[in-house]
């Protein structure tokens, strides 16, 4: 029987040895994990231009999108790596008369999508102004395509809009292309450096045929609003929501929705600012 006992002891020893080898092979030192041979490289995000949405946001079926859903959709779109970074909040050389807290209502990435050839842009002004403002549109390589100066007059602080559609000479955005825009407030006519600037990116996309048909057939702008959210169309969503709020200023649901969408892109601090009508008078060069 002694030989059987010896055999069992040998078998157990072999099993323990094999287990030690297996476990030892799975325990990789942290230093080795950080070595170039074991490093994990994330794939680069898809680059624009796009002719349709790159990432489909969470499905919304006619209901008001939550801030988390809309935030995820709006920030899925990134400016091209070779482009000039956008600036949501006022920058540049500013004098005492400049509203330095001027803010563009755009996603954190500074890139927003549109299906419009001549979209509307929104800005928060922290004070009433009577100033010269300049809107400039450039291509992806920062070549100026359009530049226009206006006298802007507002009665109080709040959110104002500038629409390319208000100028028949403004260019139509092409589907699948990226554009840069610049909004500048000229604070002192005698000092060209006394100004505040915000900037961002916009990409015009084409809707899938089925979605376009659904959008065209829907007479209810609140249903359209849901479609815009589904497709990640920041400019259409904001413009439609702003129009609805102007028409129904006592609608608390619309006010809440406005607050949610701005909070979803980290602009909650200006979400309670009123929509303000501005007088825009083109300035012609003499």
Image: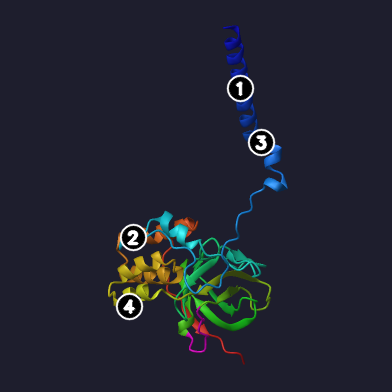
Q: Nearer the viewer, mark 1 or mark 2?
A: 1
Secondary structure of the residue carrying tag 3 is: loop
Location of residue 194 by image quarter: bottom right
- The Cα–Cα distance between marks 1 and 2, rounded to whole angstroms, is 61 Å
Seen in the picture, residue 36 relative to 247 is either above or below; the reply is above
- The Cα–Cα distance between marks 1 and 3, rounded to whole angstroms, is 20 Å
Nearest to N terminus: mark 1 or mark 3? 1
Measured as percent of width and height from the top left, residue 165 is found at 46, 83
Residue range (magenta): 167-175
Q: Nearer the viewer, mark 4 or mark 2?
A: 4
- Classify mark 3: residues with Cα within 10 Å, few (<14), some (14-19) or many (20+): few
Residue 28 marker: 3
Label 1 belongs to which residue?
Answer: 16
Label 2 belongs to which residue?
Answer: 64
Location of residue 252 by image quarter: bottom left
- The residue sitting at the top extreme is 1
User: Does the rendering let one see residue 124?
Assistant: yes
Nearest to N terminus: mark 4 or mark 2? 2
Q: Is residue 158 left or right of residue 189?
A: left
Nearest to N terminus: mark 2 or mark 3? 3
Q: Is residue 109 left or right of residue 276?
A: right
Measured as percent of width and height from the top left, residue 154 is found at 47, 73
Measured as percent of width and height from the top left, residue 282 is found at 52, 85
Nearest to N terminus: mark 4 or mark 1? 1
Q: Residue at x 60, y 67 (%)?
A: 86
Secondary structure of the residue carrying tag 1 is: helix
Label 4 belongs to which residue?
Answer: 216
Q: Is residue 2 magenta?
A: no
Q: Is residue 213 left or right of residue 86?
A: left
Nearest to N terminus: mark 4 or mark 3? 3
Instruction: Characterize the magenta stretch by its predominant secondary structure.
Output: loop
């Amino acid at each position: 029987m002694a030989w059987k006992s010896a055999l069992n002891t040998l078998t157990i020893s072999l099993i323990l040895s094999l287990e030690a080898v297996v476990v030892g092979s799975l325990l990789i030192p942290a230093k080795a994990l950080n070595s170039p041979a074991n490093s994990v490289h994330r794939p680069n995000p898809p680059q624009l231009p796009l002719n349709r949405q790159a990432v489909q946001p969470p499905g919304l079926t006619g209901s008001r999108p939550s801030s988390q859903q809309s935030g995820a959709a709006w920030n899925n779109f990134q400016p091209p790596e070779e482009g000039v970074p956008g600036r949501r909040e006022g920058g540049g050389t500013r004098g005492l008369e400049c509203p330095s807290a001027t803010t563009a209502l755009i996603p954190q990435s500074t890139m927003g999508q549109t299906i419009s050839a001549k979209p509307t842009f929104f800005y928060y002004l922290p004070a009433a102004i009577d100033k010269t403002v300049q809107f400039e549109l450039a291509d992806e390589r920062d070549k100026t395509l359009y530049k226009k100066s206006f006298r802007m007059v507002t009665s109080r602080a709040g959110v104002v809009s500038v629409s390319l559609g208000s100028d028949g000479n403004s260019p139509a955005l092409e589907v699948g292309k990226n554009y840069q825009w610049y909004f500048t407030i000229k604070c002192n006519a005698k000092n060209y450096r006394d100004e505040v600037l915000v900037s961002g990116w916009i990409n015009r996309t084409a809707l899938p045929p089925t979605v376009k048909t659904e959008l065209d057939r829907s007479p209810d702008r609140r249903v359209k609003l849901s479609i815009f959210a589904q497709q990640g169309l920041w400019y259409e969503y904001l413009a439609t929501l702003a129009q609805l709020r102007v028409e129904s200023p006592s609608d608390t649901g619309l006010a809440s929705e406005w607050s949610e969408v701005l909070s979803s892109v980290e602009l909650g601090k200006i979400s309670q600012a009123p929509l303000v009508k501005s007088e825009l008078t083109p300035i012609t060069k003499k």
